[in-house]
Image: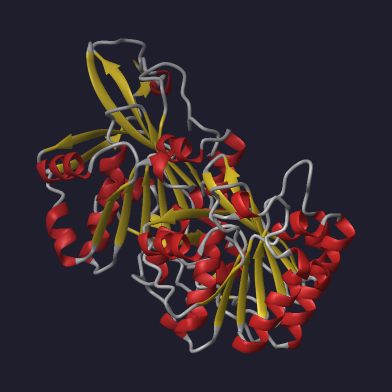
Amino acid sequence: MTTDSDDDRSRTEAPNIDRLSTGVPGLDEILHGGLIPERSYLVRGAPGTGKSILGMHYLTAGVETGETALFINLEEQTADIKQNAATLGFDLDGVEFLDLSPKSDFFTDDQGYDVFDASAVERDPLIEAISERVSSVEPDRVFVDPITQFRDLAGDDYQFRKHALSFMRLVGEHGASVLFTTQATEQEPDDDLQFMSDGTIELGYASTGRSIAVPKFRGSPTQSGDHGMAITDNGLVVFPQLAPGEYSQEFVSEPISSGIPEVDELLDGGLDRGTVTVISGPTGVGKTTTGTQFMKEAAGRGERSVMYLFEESEATFAQRSEAINIPVAKMRERGTLTVEGIEPLEVSPQEFAQKIRRQVEEEAADIVMLDGIAGYKLGIQGDEDELVTHLHSLGRYLKNMGVTVILVDEIPTITGEFQATNVGISYLADNILFLRHIEIRGEMRKVIGVLKMRTSDFERTLREFEITRHGIKVGDPLTELRGILRGTPEWKDGSHGGE
């Protein structure tokens, strides 16, 4: 890619406030650097959404930087927590614990509802136990899981709020930052805790999979919206919603050649850098091959391209390309082409956007191709409005970064009335290059044409298109044929017999 400065790849700087890392990849980005120290944050969500795992990230991130971390567990025993943490790669040996979970003799020796001795009830034993441990440990970070156990021990909402506020004030006086979870139900919501906390992190599920949002965060802006999240063998990974307006890079707007003179003539020199092109057409017409041809030519200039396959295996793509003189294996070996197969139902749009960001910002990709749009839509698992929204954000980000985008869109009709795209994305495209099957004298042939180019003029004629073992071959304009877009062309003089 031609640029004025490689250092221009950047996003808007976050406010200059001291932050505590959550330890979760991607979450600190949403929080513009992390949590604000000496404040209390609520983590809420249904069972199994990853609340306790987030707490483990938070505590171990502190230990790694030399801070003192305290885990106050009110439900699960310490041994079980450490065992579960180890399966996700967390080492909690450096974390202090205050185990206030019910013991095994709860039902056998004590018929009451309090885990403490009856003689200590009037002394608020819960707060006292926490106070003693906080004073002795002097933690920098505290994680309480779950704080709603206070409610069960307090007896009424007033006492619960009193305990919760006393706890937050206590740790605040000791200079600690607090993360706490809740177990909210319809009968016992956590609205009061949301008001008490300085911020709320919500874990849940969206149509595209696990999600995370930050609806409240005092003292600083955050990146709004529902962001993608996954629970992996190494804990949580967050994929921030793409905010294209925060990214930009200077680049030279220039046409990039396909390497085929006739195609470049159709495109008035080629595809303009930093634009979005839709290549549409029915199955088997050569859409992927046409897009790959632009990447082949880019490789000759020393530029990098990335292709994401949603509907074809990497092996099949490579085999087909090599058979028509597109040296995919050599391009990949030299680092000018990256090909990745994507399983749509296993990758959220946010995670996919993060993949692309890494290729653009870390690997300096110049061309990004999505093959095809139907598979991408399947990954979104939503309606066409969601598809257009995600594609719009992705396309705008890539354009801001000077990347040339190619979207392959398959239309269902082989011949018949012309259809530009299948999923209503025409307005997102700066350029639309279409391929079409036609019948001439009982033989299936192919044509190529340009429907739209926003940034330059283009040739209005159609040309015959052929894929040979030597590559793509494009003929002269078919000026003597009429009705090509209907799939049943006729010769200008009204006959069907000659060419």
Is residue 454 left or right of 109 when viewed as pictured? left
Image coordinates of residue 164 in percent, x first then y, are 78, 67
Q: Residue furthest front?
A: 109
Is residue 431 left or right of 111 when viewed as pictured? left
Based on the displayed image, in which of its 4 quarters is residue 357 positioned? bottom left
Position of residue 332 relative to residue 137, above or below, is: above
Of 69 and 276, the residue lying toward us: 69
* Residue at x-position 77% and y-position 57%: 151
The quarter in which the N terminus is drawn is bottom left
Image coordinates of residue 38 in percent, x first then y, are 70, 82
Q: Residue furthest right?
A: 158
Position of residue 159 relative to residue 152, above or below, is: below
Is residue 485 left or right of 323 when viewed as pictured? right
Image coordinates of residue 483 in percent, x first then y, are 41, 19
* Residue at x-position 37% and y-position 18%: 415
Count of numbered labels shown in the rendering: 0
Q: Is residue 427 visible?
A: no
Position of residue 297 relative to residue 60, above or below, is: above
Position of residue 187 relative to residue 491, above or below, is: below
Image coordinates of residue 160 in percent, x first then y, are 82, 61
Of 377 and 409, the residue lying toward us: 377
Is residue 268 left or right of 96 when viewed as pictured? left
* Residue at x-position 60% and y-position 80%: 141
